[in-house]
Amino acid sequence: MSTALSPIVSEFETKEQAASYDRWFQAKVQASRDDPRPSVPHDQAMALMRDKLTAKREDQDRINSRPRNRGV
């Protein structure tokens, strides 16, 4: 049987859900700590994300600016 949690106390409906999330989150953190690749500095990561977002926006702008075949 699940123990209900108040939405004021937790974003989860039950203690079991909260515990399951905690286990998942801790496993993700541990996997990150165990990753042998070098860390990426914050500024470098943000610059990479900015470049990717800019490329996505440019692609979307190209798609949106194409003339559409109205099937006349």
Image (cartoon, rainbow, N blue to C red):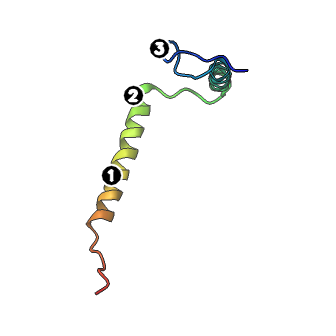
Q: Earlier in the sequence, mark 2 or mark 3?
A: 3
Report x, y in % for residue 45.
Answer: 44, 32
**Type of amino acid under label 3:** Ile
| Label 3, residues with CA under 10 Å away: few <14, some 14-19, many ≥20 | few
Q: Tags 2 and 3 in contact by the CB under 8 Å rule?
A: no
In three-dimensional space, the C-alpha distance between marks 1 and 3, rounded to whole angstroms, equals 39 Å
Q: Nearer the viewer, mark 2 or mark 3?
A: 3
Label 1 sits on a secondary structure element that is helix
Q: Which residue is mark 3?
A: 8
Q: Residue at x 62, y 30 (%)?
A: 37
> Image quarter for residue 3?
top right
In three-dimensional space, the C-alpha distance between marks 2 and 3, rounded to whole angstroms, equals 36 Å
Q: Quadrant of the N terminus?
A: top right
Q: Tags 1 and 2 in contact by the CB under 8 Å rule?
A: no
Residue 19 left/right relative to 5: right
Q: Residue at x 34, y 57 (%)?
A: 60
| Label 1, residues with CA under 10 Å away: few <14, some 14-19, many ≥20 | few
Q: Quadrant of the C terminus?
A: bottom left
In three-dimensional space, the C-alpha distance between marks 1 and 2, rounded to whole angstroms, equals 21 Å
Q: Which residue is mark 2?
A: 43
Report x, y in % for residue 16.
Answer: 68, 20
Q: Nearer the viewer, mark 1 or mark 2?
A: 1
Report x, y in % for residue 28.
Answer: 64, 26
Q: Which residue occupies the foreground of this view, 63 or 58?
A: 63
Q: Earlier in the sequence, mark 1 or mark 3?
A: 3
Label 3 sits on a secondary structure element that is loop
Q: Which residue is mark 1?
A: 57
Residue 14 left/right relative to 69: right
Q: Earlier in the sequence, mark 1 or mark 2?
A: 2
Residue 27 lies, with reference to residue 67, above or below; the image says above
**Type of amino acid under label 2:** Asp
**Type of amino acid under label 1:** Arg
